[in-house]
Image (cartoon, grey):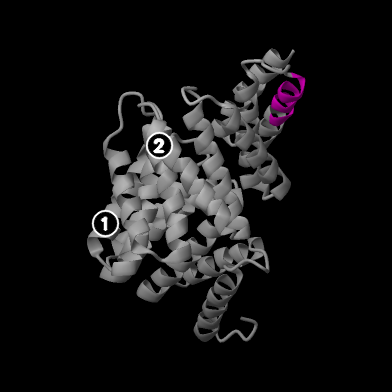
Amino acid sequence: MSTGAGALGTALLKRALAEGAPEVLDAAIEHLRNAVESTAAGDLNALAWQSNLGAALRTRYRRTERLADLDEAIGLLRRAVAESGPADPGLAGRLGNLGLALCDRFEQASDQRDLVSAIDALERALLIAGPDQRVRQAGNLVNALLERYRSTRHPEDLDRAVALGRGAAANGTAATTSADRAVALGNLAAALYERFERHGQRADLDDALAAATTAVASTSAGHPKLAAYLSTVGTLLHTRFILTGKTADLDESITSLSRAETLSRDIRGGRALALAALGNSLLDRYRWLGAATDLDAAITWQRAAVALTPDDSPDFATRSSNLAVSLAERSQHTSDPDN
């Protein structure tokens, strides 16, 4: 029974990751849980079912932010790693999933011990990863190093993240999947943008945009991560417009962010992020070209972003302030006191 439930749960998990379908993910978790609970001691499949259930629970946490799912995922993944032999071909993947789950919990609770453990797990995963996993594990480590940089502002973490990201993007093999390469490119774009914000070097911004654009091109139309990559491209184009005043960048930013808003399934506030960025780009185009329709659209999207942002989110004040600015500008434009 456990073998059938585990195989079905694993197949459903792969489908859920490809399609972003929450009902498929819930079914995957149910079958994998049944497999874990009914697996006899010493069953060779036990580690795979534990690890897959942990990955599935982490995926659901990223949609719902239900902390119990994340805590259970970390417990399962820690157990699977501890019970894996050093030559187990599945160990790198289990370490990678554990590192990502610990990063998620660090983002939620800001416990530095989780971040230290995450980076340790991801360093080990990269060290032992085979050719088919090396790009994936390097991309995961880039993400964790970025988290530590944002927490500590140590530039060596940022520079290493950029170097690792460049290597992962450039050194894929025939075994590297397009999805793994896209994740590595997306994380590289994030690292380069952080470095641009720190040092102001235009080359970092241009390289970040090139990496994010390639991530979009490498991602299939129905993939759940496509919206996030499009949002990154739109944000980077808007930033370059602010630097150069090139309206083509602003127009492309709005097009990319509009696509991101349409495709976003609101995984961990992704739709709110796209809406806020779209509103900001439209506001700047209104200021640049003076079309009242852009100002009206900016307010519509900024209102929606505020509505989707929890009151206790660090983004709530900024998004509310941006909406207030847009309403004040429309009040001046229309002399309507309701604004």
Give 40 or 173, whichever is nearer the viewer.
40
Evaluate whether residue 27 shows in this view. Answer: yes
The secondary structure type at the circle numbered 1 is: helix
Secondary structure that dominates the magenta span = helix
Residue 69 image point, x, y percent: 70, 43
Examine the structure image and report whether residue 24 is included in the region drawn in magenta: no
Q: Residue at x 35, y 49 (%)?
A: 188
Q: Quadrant of residue 72?
A: top right
Mark 2 surroundings within 10 Å by alpha-carbon count, few (fewer than 14), some (14 through 19), many (20 or more):
many
327 in relation to 303, above or below: below
To which residue does mark 1 refer? 206
Q: CA distance from mark 2 to mark 1?
A: 28 Å
Pick out the residue farthest to the left: 203
* 301 lies left or right of 142: right
281 in relation to 323, above or below: above
The secondary structure type at the circle numbered 2 is: helix
Name the quadrant of the C terminus. bottom right
User: Is tag 2's residue or tag 1's residue first in the polypeptide sequence?
Assistant: 2
Part of the protein shown in magenta: 29-38
Q: Amino acid at mark 2?
A: Leu
295 in relation to 183, above or below: below
Q: Residue at x 53, y 48 (%)?
A: 117
Residue 215 image point, x, y percent: 37, 42
Q: Nearer the viewer, mark 2 or mark 1?
A: 2
The circle drawn on residue 126 is 2
88 in relation to 265, above or below: above
Q: Quadrant of residue 316?
A: bottom right
Residue 139 image point, x, y percent: 40, 42
Q: Residue at x 33, y 43 (%)?
A: 214
Q: Amino acid at mark 1?
A: Asp
